[in-house]
Each structure stands twice: as structure tokens, then as C-alpha cells.
Image (cartoon, grey):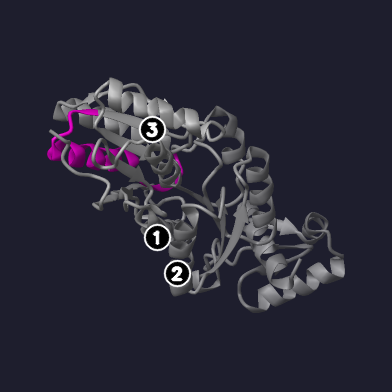
Amino acid sequence: MSVEQRHRLILRQVRDQGSARVADLAEALGVSAVTLRRDVEHLAAQGLLTRVHGGVTLPRDTDVSTPPASKLTIGMLVPTAHYYYPAVIKGAQEQAARAGARLVLGISRYDDAEDRAQVRQLVEGGADGLLLTPSRQPDDDHAEWLAGLRVPAVLVERRAELAGPASMLDAVASDHAHGAYLAVRHLAELGHRRLALVAYPSPTTPRVRVGLLAAASSLGVAVAQEVVIDRGRTDELAAGVAGLVRDQGVTGLLVHNDEDALSLVRHLGAAGVAIPGEVSLVAYDDEVAAFCSPSLTAVAPPKEEVGRCAVDLLIARLTRGPAAPGRHLALLPELRVRESSAPPSP
């Protein structure tokens, strides 16, 4: 553990308790009493702590609950750094740099246990606050973990559901239901009246489904049964989608996500299904949709802006403290129209 990390942990413990014994701090940090006294002397000389007999307290007239933004370390948990989240990370990194803060990354690979291990490591490493994207939507299994976080946290690209375990956290996410609405409205305006959702199960899929069904209802569009993507059975997936197009009159598809959309386009082409001649297709995420042939119309969540807003929320929470009102931000995706959507054939 570096000296700077040790100083942060000392300040955090004194902040949480109001005061602390030097012996207790040394034991908690796993350092000698001599090392701890040296740290305390340094922090006291900066006016961040007040020394008392056998321990330390907070200065009476100084709020040291959080260092200034230029000295903050922000821990960021994401499930992957290979798809979708690189842009979120980029936005967060840029915004942290503007504030003079340091961003430290933890990657959980969509594993619940690793979520917790990475967060523990980030906090023990000196993170003053956390940007959290758990591997799945928080539910009752997350309640104890979230309640026990030792630093402020902002939920990122996960919904702070009403009365859910993360409901009291600040949160920022793309409004994926609105993104699905944009896709359905686009297809309806082109004249499509029977659509299908093709989706790989993910934390985002339920909100995409909600938006699609709500939009279809309000726009007078019918929705065929949802097709669940099984990545081990791509040929069967393409055959099932082709059946919807040729046997059930589906002329528009919303495919989540666009990596799977690229694969589906290739297999549909091999089955003789023309895009957009027989069926129009809108992908979701817009990570690689522009590189397909034909290029795919896609819903693009504001990933970088989500990262920037997450940092702003966390810094505000750290600098203003628990008295500041909580905020749940929903950022609207945009639709990028390309070659894969067109009016249905007569």
C-alpha cells in the first residue's frame, strides 16, 4: 500500500468515526505504530487531522470528509472492456481528467463474485468513490453488498429500480426503452406493421422489450413473438427469423445487440432473405453496425456522455456530502439511419 493510499484510508476512518486511536488505526491498516504516527504527523501538519492524547480527531473548523476533486481517486467497475463499455470508460476518464481526479478500473467479466472482489480491491486501494456497473441488474442478492459499501457510489447503466437495493444511490443510464421506441417509430413511419424483437438476454434487454411493446401499442404496430438469441445455434436462429418473415408477415426486426445483428444478417443472406428487400433491420448499441453490408440502421446509446455524467454525479456527491439530493439521470439514445431499413416491399 502506498503512502498516499494509507493517508486516504486514515482520513476515511477518522471521517466515519469522528475520532480514532492510533493503535486501532495501525492495526486496521496493518502497519507499525511508528509508521502510523509518522502518517498522523504529516496529516496534522497539513491541517487535515488534530492530534489528541493517544489518537486523532477531525479539525473543528475544517471539513475533511472528502479531499478536493483534484485529489480524488475514482474507482470504476465495469463487466467488460471489450464491448459497449470502452466508450463509457472513455467518457468517464476524460471527465475525471478535467477535474484533476484519477480513474482506476476494475473489470468483473460478468461474474457476481468478481464484482465484489474488484470493488473491495478498489476501495482498499484508496478509491474515494465508485462508479458501479454490476454484472446484472441489482436485485435482493445485492442488498447487503450495496448497503455495506464504505464509500459513495453511483450506479452506471443499471436502473435504480423503485424500492430496489440501489434505489437510494445516484444513478445514470441510457434510456433503453426510449431507444427501442425510436426504432419502432422509424419502422412504423416507413410503413412496417408487423415487427419482431431478436435479442440476446442481457441486463439491457428488459428495457428494450418494454420500449418496443409500448411503442408498438401506441403506434398501432403488431409484434410477433420474441426470438431469443442462442449463440451456439446461429443457423437455427436464422431459420426461425426467416420463418417469421416468410410465414408470419414480419417486415421489421429490432436486433439487440449489433454484433449479433451482423451475424444474423450474414446467415439470413445465406438463407436467401434480402435486407432490406424482404425485411428491414434496426440494430441496438451501434458498436459495429456501420461496418456491416448493408450498413445497419442502429440505436446509439450516449455511452460517452453516460461516463461523463457519472463522474460529475460522483464528484458532486463526494464534495457536497449526504445532504445533497439524490439524482437518477436517464439519457436519451439517438437513431442513426443507414442502409438496412426501407419501406416494405409492395
Q: Quadrant of residue 263?
A: top left
Q: Position of residue 241 (x, y in %)?
A: 37, 29
Report, in whole angstroms, how far the alpha carbon at label 2 lies from the one at label 1. Answer: 9 Å
Quadrant placement of the C terminus: top left
- Mark sitting earlier along the chain (2/1): 2
In the image, 277 versus 73, the foreground residue is 277
Q: Quadrant of residue 264?
A: top left
Q: Which residue is drawn at the image coordinates 17% and 28% (left, top)?
A: 193
Q: Which secondary structure lies at badge 1?
A: helix
- In the image, what residue type sits under mark 1? Glu
Tag of residue 304:
1
Q: Is residue 235 left or right of residue 246?
A: right
Residue beneath disc 2 = 94
Q: Which secondary structure lies at badge 2?
A: helix
* Residue range highlighted in magenta: 168-194
Q: Which residue is drawn at the image coordinates 30% and 35% (left, top)?
A: 253
Report, in whole angstroms, how far the alpha carbon at label 3 lies from the one at label 1. Answer: 26 Å
On screen, residue 295 above or below 231:
below
Label 1 Cα crowd, 10 Å radius (few <14 / some 14-19 / many 20+): many
Which of the two marks, 2 or 1, is nearer to us in this view? Answer: 1
- Mark sitting earlier along the chain (2/3): 2
Which of the two marks, 2 or 3, is nearer to us in this view? Answer: 3
Residue beneath disc 3 = 198
- In the image, what residue type sits under mark 2? Glu
Q: Position of residue 88 (x, y in %)?
A: 45, 57
In the image, 34 versus 264, the foreground residue is 264
User: Does residue 177 belong to the magenta stretch?
Assistant: yes
